[in-house]
Amino acid sequence: MTISSTAAAANAANPFASVDALVAGLGSVGYIASRRIATALYMAVHLQKPILVEGSAGVGKTELALSTARLLAKPLIRMQCYEGLDESKALYEWKYGKQLLYTQILKDRMGEALADAPTMDSAMDRLHGMGDLFFSEPFLEPRPLMQALRQDDGCVLLIDEIDKSDEAFEAFLLEVLSAYQVSVPELGVIVAKTPPLVFLTSNNVRDLGDALKRRCLHLHIPLPEAALEERIVATRVPGIEATLTTQLVAFVQSLRTLDLRKAPSISETVDWARALILLHADSLDSGLVRDTLNVILKFEQDIVAVEPQIVELLHRR
Amino acid sequence: MQHTLEEFLRALRAADVKVSPAEAIDAARTIEAVGYADRELFKDALCATLAKSSDEVVRFDETFETFFTRDALDLPPPDPEDGEPPSGEGEPGVAQSPLAQALLSGDSAAVSQAMEQAAARAGVAEIRLSTQRSRLTRRLLDEMGLAEIEQIIANAKRLQTHEGARLAVRLEAARSALMARAQAYVERQHELYASGSGKQLREEMLAKKALNADGGIDPVDLVMMQALVRRMAKRLADRYSRRRHTANRGHLDVRKTLRKSMAHGGVPFEIEWKIKKVDKPSIVAICDVSKSVAAAAQFLLTFLYSLNDVVDHLDAFAFSGRLIPVNAILDDNGVEGAILKVLQTIGFQQTDYGKALEDFVDNHIDRVDRHTTVIFLGDGRSNFADPRLDLMHLIQQRARAVIWLNPEPESYWGQGDSVMYRYERFTHVAKTCNTLGQLERIIEDVLRTYSAH
C-alpha cells in the first residue's frame, strides 16, 4: 500500500488513527504486522481492553509488545509468569527486612516517646498514632503490576506466558485487567490514571479461564506466509541479499510442511539469516545448510530427519 | 443494524462460539469504532472481540462468511427486444406490487432487501429442525408477496396479447429464480442456527445411551462418541489440576516461624507458611474385556485411554481369562489401535474373575497402597468359577477405596452366574454404570475424594 507524504506525516503524529496507519507505524519501528494483528491492536487501544496474544513460540508475540512500546514511546513493563507466581511477586510486597531494621533502630526512640505516658492506655493510643508508619510508601516494594498502574503517562504492560501461572493468579488478574485498579488492604484502592496497554501472551500450555478470555481481545499469530516472512527477514536483517532471503524463506517454509517436533518459527528464520550473513554467504547450498541446520532446528531427531532431504528440499520450489 | 448484529451473535452461539452479553456490548462498541465501510476491517475487528481461541476463530470465519454473504439474485436481464425499460406499467397490478417491479427491472438489491424483511416477519431465523425447511420457505415467499406475482401472471396470460405473454414468461422465470433463492436462504439459515444444535442434541443422546444396548453403538456415532469421551476426561483433568494448585497456598505457620526466628535473636526475619498437602490421585483400573461385556468394553477402554493421558498415576489392567497390564499399550498406540490391540491380546475369552484376581495379587499387589483407588469395570459374572473373595478382601484392606462399576442394572446382579452381590461386600461403592454420563460422574467423585486435607 502506498501512503502519500502528507498522510504519512499525519500518521506519524498519530499511528492509531487507522489500521493502515498502524501497519505503517509498526513497520517504522521494525515490526511487519499483518492486517489482522494491526486490527486487533487498533481495537485494543480504542476499546481500552487487554489483548491476549496466542501462537507458537517465536512468532513474535513478545516482539509485538516491545514494538508497540517503541511506537508509543512509552516504557515497557514486563512481567514473566511462572508456576507459583503470586501477588507478592506480581503486585507489591512489604519490605520486611527494612521494617524490622527500622523497628530495631527506633526501639530506643520509642521507649523515650512512650516513657512519659502515664498509663498503659495512653501509651497504646500513642502507639496507634505511629502504627501506620511501617506500612506506608517507603516500605512498599512495588512489583510490575503496581508499577504499571502508577505510570501516570501510561505504559505498555507485558504479561508474558500467562498460561504458565496458576489459576488463582489468573483470577487475581481479573481486577487489574477489567478496571485497571488493584486493592492493597493497607493503602486502599490504587487506580491507574492512564490505563496501561496490556499484552498477555500464551503458548497454550493450559487452557485459560473463560473469565480472563472474556476480558481480553484475542489475537492468534500464525506462522507467516512466504511473502510476509521475506519482508520480516529483510527488515530484521538489514544488508541481506534479496536472492538469499527468497531462498532461505522458501527453505524454511518447506521445512514447516514436514512432520517435525518443533517447526522453525520466525525468530529461527531471522537467526538463521543473521548466521548466514556472518558466514558471508550469498546463496544457499546443501553444505552450508547442513552446517547451519542447528540454528533452525532445535531437536536432534529433527536434524537427523531433515539432513538426508536437504538437497531435495532446496530444489523443491 | 442492531437486529442484524444480534442475529449474527445468535448464529455464532449456534456455532459454539461463546458470546456473553458483555461480549455483545463489546461487539457493539467495536462496530462503533470501526464502522461498516471496510468489510475486512469489520470482520477482523469483530473477530478479535468475539473469538477467544484459534478454534473459535475458524468457526467465526465460517459463520461470518455464511452470514454476511449474499449471492446476487439471478434475475433475467431486462428485455432486450425493445429499448424501453420493461416496467410493465400498462399491466394491471404491476404498479401496485413493488416486488414485481423489482423483479422486472432486475433490481436484485431491492429483492434481497425485501427477502431479508420478509424473513424477519416469517421468523425464518427461528428454524430448529431440518423438517421445518420447506414450510418456512413457503412462508417466506408468502410474506414477500408471491401471491401478487401469481395474480399478475394469471392476469397477463388471460389478456392473450403479445405484451401479456412476454410479461408472463419473464415473470415466471423471475419467480422460479426467486423460489430457488428463497430455498437457498432458508437452507443457509438452517445451517447457521440449527445444525449446531442438532449436533448438541445428538451428543446429549449419546451420553445417555446405554453402552451395552442391543447392537452396541452405531458405527456412525463412534467417532463422535470417542470425541465425547475424550472431552469428558479432559474436563475431569482440568478440574482436578485446579484443585491441586490451590493446595499450595497456606497461612502463616506461627510455630515454624518462631522456631526459625531463634537464630536472629527472636526477630522473625524468615516467614514460614503452612503448606497443605494433597494426595495425587493414584488409580488402578481393572477392566473386564470378556464376551459378556464386549459392547461396553470398547468404551470403558476408550475412557481408560483418555484418563491415561490426563492422570499421572494411572495403572490400567485388562482381563478376561488372564490379567495383563495395558499401560504400555495405551501409551504407545493411538486410541483405536490401543483398543484393538488390547482386545486382540486378551479380549473375548471366557471370563475368570478368580484367575484374574489371582494374577493381579500375585504380580501387582505392591501397586495398591493406602493412597490408591481401585476401580473395577466389569459385570461380575464369573462363569461359576471360584470368585476368590479372599483376594478381593485383601485388595480392599490395602486400598483406600474400591469402586466397582457394573454395566448391568442392579436387578440383574446375583442372577445366573453373577456374583456381583458377593463382590459388593468388599467394595466401598458398587454402582451401575452403563452410560458415559454416569461414568463421568463416578470418576469425578473419585477425583474429588483426593482433595486437600
Image (tube, grey):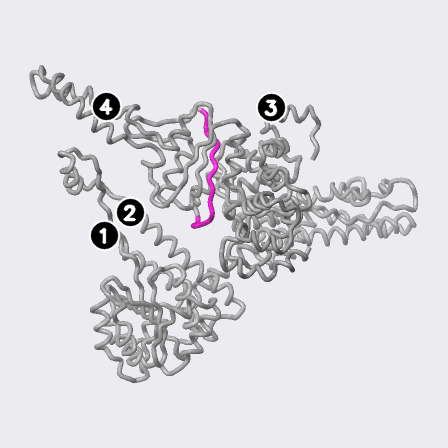
Give the image location of residue B391, x and y in percent: 23, 76
**Which amino acid type is shown beneath numbered disc 2?**
Asn
The answer for how far apart the CA atoms under marks 2 and 1 are is 12 Å
Q: Can you say whether B30 is above or below A5 in the image? A: below
Q: Relative to the observer, which residue lies in front, B438 or A241?
A: A241
Residue shown at 92% from the left, 41% from the top: B83
Q: Provide the secondary structure element on which disc 4 rests.
A: helix
Q: Amino acid at mark 3?
A: Ala
Residue A195 forms part of the magenta stretch: yes
The residue under label 2 is: B248
Instruction: Point out residue B423 in the picture as x, y percentages from the top left corner.
Output: 26, 74
Q: Which mark is residue B453?
A: 1
Q: Is residue B11 visible?
A: no
Left/right of residue B94 with respect to residue A284 in the rendered view? right
- On the rendered structure, is B266 left or right of B95? left
Badge 2 element = loop
- The residue drawn where x is 9% and y is 15% is A116
Residue labelled with disc 3: A13
Q: Which mark is residue A132?
A: 4
